[in-house]
Image (cartoon, rainbow, N blue to C red):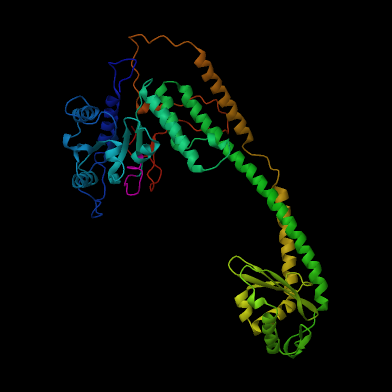
Amino acid sequence: MVVPRDPSGPSKVDVAADAIHRIWERTRDNEYLDTVTGQPSTVRGSLQLVFSDIGTPNQDRWNAYDELRQQLVQRGIPAEQVRYMHEAKTDVEKARLFAAARAGHVAVLIGSTEKMGVGTNVQARAIALHHLDCPWRPSDIAQRDGRIMRQGNQNEEVAIVRYVTERSFDSYMWQTVERKAASFAQLLRGKINAREIEEIDTSALSAAEAKAIASGNPLLLEHSVILNEVNRLRRLQRAHERNEDMLVHTGNRARSSAERAAADIRGLEAAAPRMIDTSGDRFRITLGTRDYDSRSDAAHALAAWMGDSGLKWLPRYGHKDFGIIGRISGFDIHVEARSGLTTLDVTVSLPEVPRSGFTMPKESFLEAGLGLVQRIENRVSGIPSLLDQAREDLAEAEQTVADTQQRLGQPFRHAQALADAEEDLARVESQLAAMQDEPAPEPAAPESEPVELTVEAVRSYEPNLGSREGTGVPAAGDWSSTAPHSPEREPPGLRL
């Protein structure tokens, strides 16, 4: 945890102690609601969580936990308010420690991912979370951050701080987490194309940035930021291409719909003058070789036909075209049975009248009786309505064709930004490749000043991205996070 270039310089624990103490001083008088009563608590002060999987408490040797606690006490934080998660050995002791943290009796809670991860419910007053080290798994980072970024946190804004040491094992650790996070994200996305499988999600990018900072090479951080922007713009480009394909498909489908509607209109316009009025006592229908002027008699005749034709006994997965079974209002009546999704379906249509068909499950068809006769009759009397609907469908389809034609072929509006970002990426990658070919630099002279990796240094770092106006390349160094339920504003005293 000591900066390699100067072992006598500040360690990571020193830097963390300074940051934790500054936050404590500025938030020690923050007021919170009692999590039990919901009323303003008489105990003031926020809570800070510190994660470290190495240097855990050990009575026989030096450890980071005791060193950090000692430095915090020396800076003025009451010793009884700096607690270890390792103190709680049982579920009862854990519950008491959590309750004390929520009530404001704990200012700093230090623990490992294993002991202070899942099940740690202390977010009510949590104002800052500190990563003293990098765990091996991306899920561990998510578990750590989940202790503060969750519902029930009463702070409007929280801080998440990662501490790294230049040219140390930290770089390897963050690189490992970055690789795992990227691989897991690819796996969770499922089967995707080759270009998408190279993308890194938000958590992986954070690991990449931390790795870059730890390496001491600002070009690596610049590369991470530019690569993220290139990937974002490429995703937008793929979305644009998919939208173009969708417009082509929509236009083709609309043209087919327009052609069908136009054909239906021609058929309905031809059928309309042939209509014979069958309303009231003028009802007439032919079934088989017999004519009927009574709807009830026609219903009995249809029921008899169902048995004689074999429709009644047709199995679930059967299929039979019964052909023309009769005639009404000058139009043939056609019946066909075929297997549907869950039952045998029977379709009745007037072949000379477009859109006149209707389908019923066999059981409903057999029991329809008089209603079936009336439904067949209504298909003829409904020709004017069918014609109106066909004309509406034609107009809608033609409008869709016109709309897709107008929208199709629009250029990708971020094309220039993508080209600029890819040019910047190529420039940085070329510089990184050249650096690998250069001889290793001479060790720094002993009198050179130690490198102190502070949060201020990270926040003030803004790499020269070589970006152009309108590229939208984000600046690096944002280490604060907003609570899930909170408005975005910086509370007084939280700036590190």
- Regarding residue 362, the answer to whether it shows in the image is yes
Where residue 9 appears, x then y in whole percent?
A: 29, 17
**Quarter of the figure with residue 311:** bottom right
Query: In the rendered structure, which segment of residues is drawn in magenta?
Result: 145-155
Magenta segment's dominant SS is: loop
Q: Nearer the viewer, residue 322 or 134?
A: 322
Q: Which of 88 and 24 is in front in this view?
A: 88
Q: In which quarter of the image is the N terminus?
A: top left
Q: Residue at 41%, 25% (x, y): give it.
A: 213
Residue 422 within the segment the image draws in magenta: no
Q: Which of 353 and 202 is in front in this view?
A: 353
Residue 148 within the segment the image draws in magenta: yes
**Quarter of the figure with residue 288:** bottom right
Q: Is residue 247 left or right of residue 189?
A: right
Where residue 118 appears, x then y in whole percent?
A: 31, 44
Where residue 220 appears, x then y in whole percent?
A: 47, 24
- Regarding residue 477, the answer to whether it shows in the image is no
